[in-house]
Amino acid sequence: MFKNKIEYNIRNYVSMEKTKTNINRRAFLKASALVGGGLLIHFSALAKFEIAATSVNAVNPVQWNELTGYIKITADNIVKILCPNPEFGQNVMTSLPMIVAEELDVNWKKVVVEMGAHDNVKLGPQFTGGSNSMRMYWKPLREAGAAARRMLMEAAAQTWGVPVEEISTKAGMIIHEKSGKTGKYGDFASKASSIPVPKNVKLKDVKNFTVVRNSQKNVEGTKIISGMPLFGLDYRMEGMLIAMIQHPPAFGMTLKSFDGTEALKMPGIKNVFKLKLYEDGFEQGGFDTRTFNDLLVIVGKTTWEVMNARKKLIVEWMPAGDTKDTMGGRGGKKEVIVPGELENTANQHEKMRQYASQPAQELRKDGDPETAFKNAAQIIERTYNAPFLAHNCMEPMNFFAHVTADKALLVGPLQAPGWTEPTLAKVLKLTPEQIEIQMTRMGGGFGRRAYGHYLVEAALISKKANAPIKLIYSREDDTTYGIYRPMYTATYRAALDANKNLIAFHVKGGGIPEHAIHANRFPAGAVDNYLAEGWQIPSNITIGAFRAPRSNFNAAAEQSFLDELAEAMDKDPIDLRLALLKRAKENPVGKNNEYDADRYAAVLKLVKEKSGWNGPEHKKFSRGVAAYFCHNSYAAHVVDMTTKDGQPYVERVFSAIDCGIVINPDAATNMVQGAVVDGIGNALYGGLTHKNGVVEENNFHKYRIIRMHEAPKKVEVHFVQNDIDPTGLGEPPFPPVFGAVANALYKSTGQRFYQQPFSSPQQVIPAV
Amino acid sequence: MITLNINQKTYTVDANPDTPLLWVLRDMIGLVGTKYGCGVAQCGACVVHLNGEAVRSCVTKASRAEGKKVVTIEGLSPTHTHPLQTAWLDLDVSQCGYCQAGQIMSAAVLLKENKKPTDQDIDDAMAGNICRCGTYLRIREAIHLASELQEKQALGK
């Protein structure tokens, strides 16, 4: 089962294979040991750990003693901690093992970290998404570390014949103070691994952490900067072929016929065939989204040969017409019609305008908004729009698959193996036990890699081609495939009384194919009369989770609107938000208000303080502020804009974040800085348009991504210090950036921006 | 057959000379540190050095590299301790890491030609390297730090 892993590693890593044959068979059976470990031992860890590496090869066989699913220790005291969640740049590979190491009480610098296998029994849910990794694994990993430490103490107590209460630990050492006896964890690891895992072990006081809450370097840092193979696209196996899919040129089109004769004559080309992804009536789960079902595949020896030969495929496409998808789920099977229209962006805008004027689904109502608006002294109404966004992960979609009659090995970048495995089992007619998914590092995720269609594609191709294959999407394939952030619009209305008090708030949001509204988010709870409505327009343009789904638009629209409100009410924008939050705290309106008003207010106050808001020394900047709550964390930004080369330029940003306990402060700062840059880029430049179903921006020369010279000079990040259990950070800082940028643009240009991307010349004039 | 000098080693590969150097490196020689991001010279993930110049290997035919010295991220420093690599680790620059080899290779040429680049110099030199994770601020800081480290090394400190 591990054969292929070793092949991958022999090329590039210190091989542990020579130790395998030294295994003492009896020793192997006695300890529930996992032999031949070190399959993905990190170069950086080994480099720092030369002595141990030598001692492992020299005398002792590599026998890993497993203490809980996350921890393995050798007799030589090498501690390996498995990371359960796949990595896409949020640095879980460092922070999750840090949590284990803290409670285990080992020297972090000596720990070897390894990406865990796909094992939902031993390693938990293993999905990277929704900013959930820290939140979901905080307690389980602490308990695992503490339990393992306890098991080692018990083993020592038994060995020394002393009460376990007299045993203590210190950074990988076991100590019996009374007698002066000491030992290494490794001395007792074998014995400890047969002790039952204790429950309810006492955890450390969070104020005494020495690993967590201290900045630790990225465990894969050295590998990244030295060009070692890490990503799915880097994975190689002897005899592997390359496959690419010739997708239809537009949404709403499908394969009619093809002629591969010319392509097959090209050097290196092995096969051209078509295949069906899902059989008719296949029940899709939420993450089985796919755009095209009838696939034209070309297989060859090398990437370039396949990329070249693709151009020789003679293909006839035809409109797919309306099609049917079967969706599974808790409510039972449901059939969904996917419209066949070849969409144009101009038509989409027109359709949205029509739907916006029609009745919509009520999502929340407090008080009597209709009457309040009738009696208003002043009504402010604004409409905001944002386009489809492509994730554009730097590493395009790809996956390796080797499928035989009774086994499937899949290796590559994905966010949630557990969500795609059932689909693979159904499609390949194998049991989950026959399927092995190995998670490589991902060159970006952003939600895109939660949708495992490309694993299923790779597996079916391997099966049909009867060979191990690597499926690769070119950048054009990737950007035009879909699973986008939806196209959104929202109309906000506010009613003010004669004294400029806010008496009613109304948001009606829509989208293709779904709206963005979070009905229970601020300012719901702060306004007596509140109405939230939503509508949607079905489409064949597929969509999926995109960094802070829905929030990434909501925050932009709502936070811009609050800014205009503040102006109409002669209030400072931060003061207005704080006043509303005060109301939500002291006298909340309605139920299910999905935020903690104190924590929300705290990030606003913190960013106000750290940015020197309203300070005369910042006069040269056009300042915009926004705050938002999503994925259980709070974020506020002050964006300071100047001009550079005649263009609005975000020169610096102040950020205030509350995500509870900050596990790895410097890495967390990096994340927030990255989210700010990502937010500026998407707000100013990002967006896809369609013409007859064809995506008009299919590579980076047309789809504009923010670059070095457009990135701020400084992003100063401040975390609220508290001892609240950690919540996520991948998404929360992202949405309010859009709003803060819009608000800064107003101060910079005197003009309000309603249409993303903000660099587009057509900014919709607000309806009066 | 084409013969290439990569990181001071000679490789003879059975490749069509029109094959972009990127794919010869990745598919045929097995040096996968140089990345594919776009294939149209827009993102910089594929940057290598050709006789000391930064080139985009996704659009550079392998034949163009014959008779020249190619350096990839794997060979930038035999011990991976080029001042940029040291600075990158010092400042913990990387997030997903996919673009970073290309960033370092572009920056290496900048630092060779300009020992003390300003922010503007860095903007100009690095505008062709995309980072979707948004690590630009740290990249900029790392280039400045590497410039200092480089100076210290030159002075024998």
Image (tube, grey):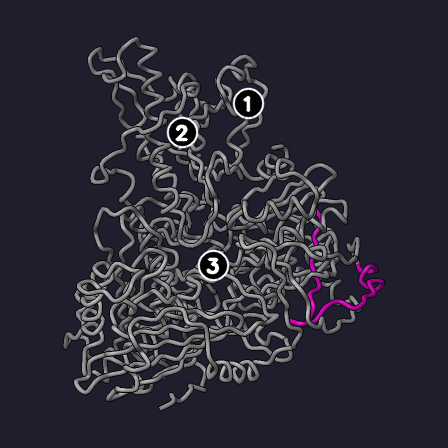
Q: Which residue is mark 3?
A: A446
Q: Which of the two marks, 3 or 2, is nearer to us in this view?
A: 3
The answer for how far apart the CA atoms under marks 3 and 2 are is 32 Å
Residue A560 visible? The answer is: yes
The chain identifier of the residue carrying mark 2 reads: A
Disc number placed over residue A79 in the picture, else none: 2
- Residue B88 position within the rendered picture, expressed as x and y whole percent measured from the top left: 38, 52
Q: Which residues are magenta?
A: A240-266
Residue A252 sits inside the magenta stretch: yes
Q: Which of the two marks, 1 or 2, is nearer to us in this view?
A: 2
Marks 3 and 2 belong to one chain: yes
Nearer to the camera, A38 or A339 = A339
- What residue is at 33 percent from the left and 18 percent from the top? A154
The chain identifier of the residue carrying mark 3 reads: A
Give the amino acid type for the residue marked by disc 3 in the picture.
Answer: Phe
- Quarter assignment of residue A313: bottom right
Q: Which residue is mark 1?
A: A19
Say which quadrant the C terminus of chain A sits in.
Answer: bottom left
- In this image, B18 relative to A196: left or right? right
- What residue is at 44 percent from the left and 78 percent from the top? A385
Image: A756 above or below A154: below
Give the amino acid type for the residue marked by disc 2 in the picture.
Answer: Val
- Residue A478 position within the rendered picture, expressed as x and y whole percent measured from the top left: 59, 63
Q: Earlier in the sequence, mark 1 or mark 3?
A: 1
Assess disc 1: are there few (<14), some (14-19) or many (≥20) residues with their C-alpha within 10 Å of its C-alpha.
some
